[in-house]
Image: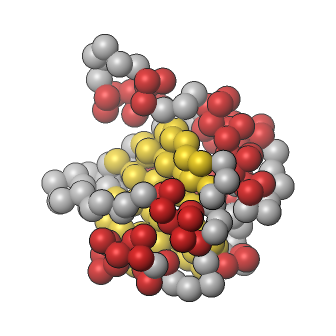
Amino acid sequence: MGYWGYYVVARSGRPLKELESLAGVRDEMTLLEERADDWQVWECPGGGGEPTPDVGSMNALAAETGAPALFAYVMDSRCAVVEAAAPQSGAWTTCLGRAAMGQYIGGGELSLEDYFLPPDDAAGHAVAWAAEGGLTVAEQPILDVLGAEAQPSAEELFFRFLDRLGVTSR
């Protein structure tokens, strides 16, 4: 069984677990990385047999920090739901590891596109999200990640996505 849980990413001069918008998961959060320009990556494990934490609203986190924010909910290391928000441009949702995500939602009446932005639309939103955070990024590298399979894991694909968004290591 692979990893289940959230990664929470935002820019703040304070530790994210101190923010009111993340108060509901404060005790479950662990700092994974401090990236350049006050970007932080926190982990909040859960799901896959454990209770799934409610990390709250990315809109509330973006409003509280005054900067873009996002989370990824990784499902069994196979795929991830990505929800992002920025104070001015609002929220958008996509996924990583689309084929595996399609297996999770099944073949009912609703399709993957009913739940998530398709890669080309998501890439455009991601570029705008990055720009609102003062980052200049190209759309094609983001589109490449959005269309990739989660090999070797959704976690690694998510961190590649962060790098393409310009949320880079120190």
Q: Position of residue 147 (x, y in %)?
A: 60, 33
- Which of the 4 quarters of the picture holds residue 21? bottom left
At a point 83% along the width and 55% down the height, the residue shown is: 136
At a point 29% along the width and 23% down the height, the residue shown is: 106
Along the horizontal axis of the image, is 13 left or right of 141? left
The number of discs equals: 0
Residue 155 seen in the current view: no
Q: Position of residue 145 (x, y in %)?
A: 64, 41
Along the horizontal axis of the image, is 36 left or right of 14? right
**Is 133 located above or below residue 148 in the figure?**
below
Along the horizontal axis of the image, is 103 left or right of 96? left
- Which of the 4 quarters of the picture holds residue 45? bottom left
Coloring applied to the structure: secondary structure
Along the horizontal axis of the image, is 142 left or right of 77? right
At a point 61% along the width and 78% down the height, the residue shown is: 12
Nearer-the-camera pick, 59 or 170? 59
Q: Position of residue 96 (x, y in %)?
A: 51, 41
Q: Position of residue 118 (x, y in %)?
A: 57, 28
Nearer-the-camera pick, 77 or 59? 59
Question: Looking at the rendering, in which quadrant would you find the C terminus?
Answer: bottom right
Nearer-the-camera pick, 7 or 11? 11
- Which of the 4 quarters of the picture holds residue 78? top left
Residue 28 seen in the current view: yes
**Is 132 located above or below residue 147 in the figure?**
below
At a point 59% along the width and 72% down the height, the residue shown is: 65
Nearer-the-camera pick, 153 or 168? 168
